[in-house]
Image (spheres, rainbow, N blue to C red):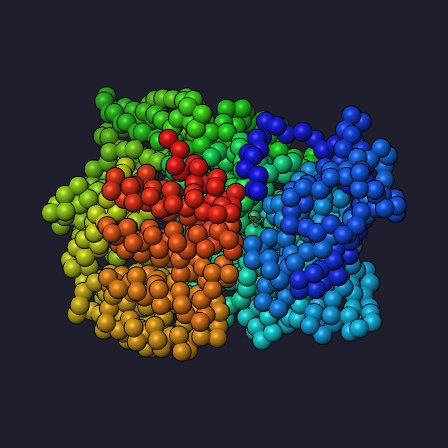
Amino acid sequence: MTDFTARYLSDYQVSNFSIATVDLTFELADTATIVTSTMAIKRENKNAKQLVLDGEQLKLVSLQINQQDLPESYYQVSDTQLALDISADEFILTIVTEIDPLNNTSLEGLFKSGGAFCTQCEAEGFRRITYYLDRPDVMSTFSTKVIADKKSYPYLLSNGNKTAAGDLPQGKHFTCWQDPHPKPCYLFAVVAGDFDLLEGSFTTQDKRNVALEIFVDKGNLPKAHHAMASLKKSMLWDEETFGLVYDLDIYMIVAVDFFNMGAMENKGLNVFNSKFVLADNESATDTDFFNIEAVIGHEYFHNWTGNRVTCRDWFQLSLKEGLTVFRDQQFSADMHSAPVNRIKNVRLLRSKQFAEDAGPMAHPIRPEKVLEMNNFYTLTVYEKGAEVIRMINTLLGAAKFRKGMDLYFARFDGMAVTCDDFINAMSDASGVDLVLFKAWYHQSGTPILSVEEGFSNEQYQLTLTQTNPSQKDGSEGKALHIPVAIELIENNKVIRRQLLELTSEQQTWTFDNFVEKPVLAVLADFSAPVKLSINQTDQELATVMAFADDEFCRWDAGQQLMLNYIKALIDDSSFALPNSLLTTYQAIFDANTDNAFKAEQLSLPSFDEVVAEIAQVDPIKVVNAIAAVKLFLVTGLTASFEKTFIDNKASAYKYSGEEVGQRALKNVCLSYLSLLEQQQSKVVEQYQSSDNMTDTLAALACSADNNLVDLAGQLQHFEQKWHSTALVMDKWFSLAAQQCSTNIFSSLDRLLAHPLFSLKNPNRARSLVGNFSVNNPRYFHCQSGQGYQFLAEQIALLNEINPQVASRLITPLIQFRSFDLPRQKLMRAELEKLTTLKNLSKDLKEKLDAALAG
Ligand code: B3K
Ligand code: ZN
């Protein structure tokens, strides 16, 4: 019987016992791996009588205290715990457990991914390996011995440095590892397998040599070079930017095909979804190359923000995740175009995090109540968490922010701490008062920032008002400390730039000496994660688009303009779009800006971004309105789209900033042109002539989104060419699921039955099921409810196989309140059905309860 008791931040207590050292031995076998754990334990709280260890899905084989068997009357075992009555204050506890990695489809704890053994312990997976104090504030020194068949598993890896290795009878061998840095068990890892190994090295600023090793499936070595280069860039960047130097002699990355998320920062032994390691010019897109560098960076940066300084408890997750996302965003911005990266961050936040904040699972970046911790690796904790760190950076300025980071490490290196500890370090180092700012950590929901302007007697008045949504407990949302960066434009020139700090519900600023009312560019660089409510005329928006200094504002004004017209079309589908829009859009083509930025300017707000703006909207109206604006623009400006498309056809593929920008711009133009029948031959031609995955997929997406006649042939050709490359077949399943056709449901059935499809593989499940429900809105939201039913059926199956993946994929259904009442009813009905599942996981239970409450 699953335990559905929630845990609360307010219940935190320090551990009654500590574990100074852990020695682990793994005797690896498919269905019966034996784990021996020997721990040096000390009672820290004299009043604590029982030692209660966490453990799930374990077979207890034996139990010894100081090498003596413990009589059964001294301990109790349940489905989730091992409770021991021990009188000694310091003792050695030896526990032997048996586990079944082969049948572990949840991919938590020890499991098999393809032919390799690997582990995933964060958040609470270590308890599926052995009984332990599975909480991040219990930090111990780990040593590990791994034993396995030598032929099948030539590489036996764990955290830290290798201390011994040798052969054993019966074709087995062993390797021993010692990690000198005390760590919580969520950072523990073991991997065993037969890999190709790419070796490299990095010399630290203090002239130490670090061996870099990337392990990939046999035959994939040529695809690991970009990952290696990215790792070296990350190591150098962290030294140069934050003075943070790597602290072991070896850094290993293992790429596996079956993985619940992107990657995991285990100390000295990262495990990665192969999607974020493998790339070559033929099989990877520009986005893949970019993401690999970003995720390699993210995991590497965790070595300091996460591993050296970790979380006291899981409610503090954003301490390491928000901060590390901020760091990886800064890294990407330094490696590529800062404004384009910022735009991408904001698009993600607006399309996905705003929806989460408005939905039933809304939570502060530091949640207060959790049933299943894995449900809280969210866009809120990660992306909004990063925005909160960014606001601190904005309020302090870069130099003081760096001083704050230095103080944070000086105070807390080797410790498990809280978000408050972080903010206090920032405020102590800088002298900046962050008391009010702390509310960002305990308030959920997206603030609305309303802007009122006034002008009289050469004075410009700006009034900012913040409205914060009411909280889950019914309390009112309180005023937050919001940094609002603005520019004022007069005569097509920015003449004033200022950082305003809104610290109460409403404040007014007055600016003197203006001949006429200036044009406002607000939220420069998106200085706060808020929704903006502002009435600017088309003329003002066009001025901001053309003359603001801040690139984000220039881009955002264009988005605002388009959004206004998309909304008008949602209200009234016969609304006539004005020709002035064409003039404004033509100016984007004509401006002397870089291609990647232009590509972002030409891209309309996405389905999700529009949904986030309108209460209880009819999703089909959203799809139609966006399509109508797109058609209007391409019909009016065909020549510009066509010329830009042709001018940006690059020669042989190269992954470099300039070419990436060219391809992005060209492919945005193709996406517009593909709406016009007489232009559709361009799609076919690009598909046929492309030498790279970015252009191939762009062409395929045009075919799928417009259901072009060539789609079937293209998909077949693509499948023949790539059927044995797993990561590329994920793309194939995604595209096939995106087909905008009335036949989609029979296609989906065929895809589910495809020999290469399996719900057990998270990447596959996400490609097909996830992509259909997120990127095929016309059919996911079709009036019959078939789309919702399809998703719910797959979730029901995944509930048994892999609850974490099931719980991720359910997101579009639980956000039903964003849509009109008929859809709400249909989606709700599917959710209600899911509540009756046998063996309902905690992951789903938590979300279903939240969604169906009230
Ligand atoms: N810390 C891991 C995520 C673990 C997710 C557990 N469900 C990867 C990362 O954020 O870097
Ligand atoms: Zn992370």
Q: Would you say 610 lies left or right of 353 here? A: left
Residue 304 visible in the current orientation: no
Image coordinates for residue 393, horizontal then vertical, percent = 52, 37
State whether residue 433 is above or below residue 492.
above
User: Residue at (36%, 21%) from the top-left corner?
Assistant: 506
State whether residue 746 is above or below residue 326.
below
Image coordinates for residue 42, horizontal then vertical, percent = 81, 36
Q: Would you say 521 lies left or right of 807 here? A: left
The answer to which quarter of the image holds residue 177 is bottom right
- Quadrant assignment for the C terminus: top left
- Quadrant assignment for the N terminus: top right
Q: Would you say 779 lies left or right of 596 here? A: left
User: Residue at (49%, 69%) from the top-left corner?
Assistant: 726
Residue 772 visible in the current orientation: yes
525 or 442: which is nearer to us? 442
Image coordinates for residue 37, horizontal then vertical, percent = 78, 50
User: Residue at (82%, 69%) from the top-left corner?
Assistant: 168
Image coordinates for residue 407, horizontal then vertical, percent = 66, 35
How many marks on residues? Answer: 0
User: Residue at (22%, 30%) from the top-left corner?
Assistant: 516
732 or 597: which is nearer to us? 732
